[in-house]
Structures are given as C-alpha cells and as structure tokens.
Image (tube, rainbow, N blue to C red):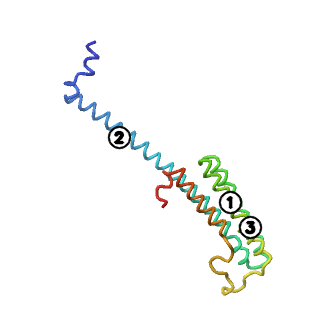
Amino acid sequence: MKELRGFVDFDFWASEPGAIIIAGFLAAAVAVVGYAWQQRQSRADARAVMYSEALRAVEDYAEAPFLVRRRSGREARAAVTGQISEIQSRLRLYGALLEISAHEKISTAFEDLVQAARTQAGKAMSEAWRAPRIRRDADVPGHRPYDRGEIDRARAAYLSVIRRHDRIASRHVK
C-alpha cells in the first residue's frame, strides 16, 4: 500500500523528481500529438494532390480536340493518338485510385466528370479528326471552340463533393 501511496502523493509530484517525470510525460505527449497531426496533414496533402491530378487528367482529355486540330501532318497522327491513349490511361488510373482510396461520392463524381468529358470532348475530337488540320496560327480557335457545359458542371460537382466529403484535404479550396 505504501508504493501506491507514493504514486498519488502530491508532495512527490510537486518535488523536483516528480516535476521531471511530469515534464517527460508532457514532452512525450506533445511529440506524439505533433507526429499524429503531421501525419494527418501529410495524408490530406497526398489526397489533395491525387484529386487535382485526377482533375488534370480530365482537363488534358478535354484539350485533346485541340491536339487533333494542331497535328502537323500524317506522321503526327500516331503521336497524337499516343498522347490521347496516355491520357485515357491516366483517366482509368485515377478512377481506380479514387475508387480505392476516396469517399464513394468523390469517386462517383469523378466518374461522372470523366463521362461528361468523354461525351463532349469525344464528340469534339471526332469532329476535329474530320476537320482539316490547322496550318496557320491565325486558324487556331478561340478559348472555347466547343461546348464544355457538361464538363464544367461535372467539374464543379466534383470539387463540391471533395469539399463536402474530405474537408481536411480541401482546406485551401474555396
């Protein structure tokens, strides 16, 4: 009983040896909490990068009609097709990553965004392959030569779902 009494003995904890023990426990607690916080922030930052890289892949696909129109000749057809294939691969990669590691609603919103991009940009890409290639800088179309309404709405929905279901990763998004 004497040993237990030493543990709750306030005189001991107020003494120099007790204060050293308390300081050690506090330092350890601060270190553990700081490490946990840093790990949480690192994971959130990694998710934010994943979300934005997924969005970048969609935007690259949405820009593909411009790649097609700017092809420089027959030999460029294979290069452009290869670029588009690589973009498609990234879309599938990020779709799988989000399905595995993101909230289900974020993954679904991304798939909706990809579908909107495939519908609108895919149609514009088909038209671009049939159109004559651009030969002069003056022939380069303006900022938005095809309707991106569905893509823009799906993009806004994707970002909104991220804000709603991953508040930590989207802490800097307004």
Give the residue type that dot 2 points to: Val
Residue behind mark 2:
30
Is 124 left, or right, of 58 in this rendering? right
- Kindly identify the amino acid type of the residue bearing the numbered disc 3: Gly
* Residue 70, quarter of the rendered image: bottom right
Q: Is residue 79 above or below residue 158?
A: below
Residue 128 % position (x, y): 75, 75
Q: Give the structural element (helix, strand or loop) at label 2.
A: helix
Mark 3 → mark 2, Cα distance in angstroms = 54 Å
Crowd rating for badge 3 (residues with CA inside 10 Å; few <14, some 14–19, many 20+): some
Give the mark nearer the N terminus: 1 vs 2.
2
Nearest to the eye among marks 3 and 2: give it. 3
Residue 122, numbered label: 3
Rendering coords of residue 101 (x, y %): 60, 47
Who's the residue at 66% across and 70% down the image?
A: 148
- Residue 1 falls in image quadrant: top left
Say if mark 1 contacts mark 2, CB within 8 Å. no
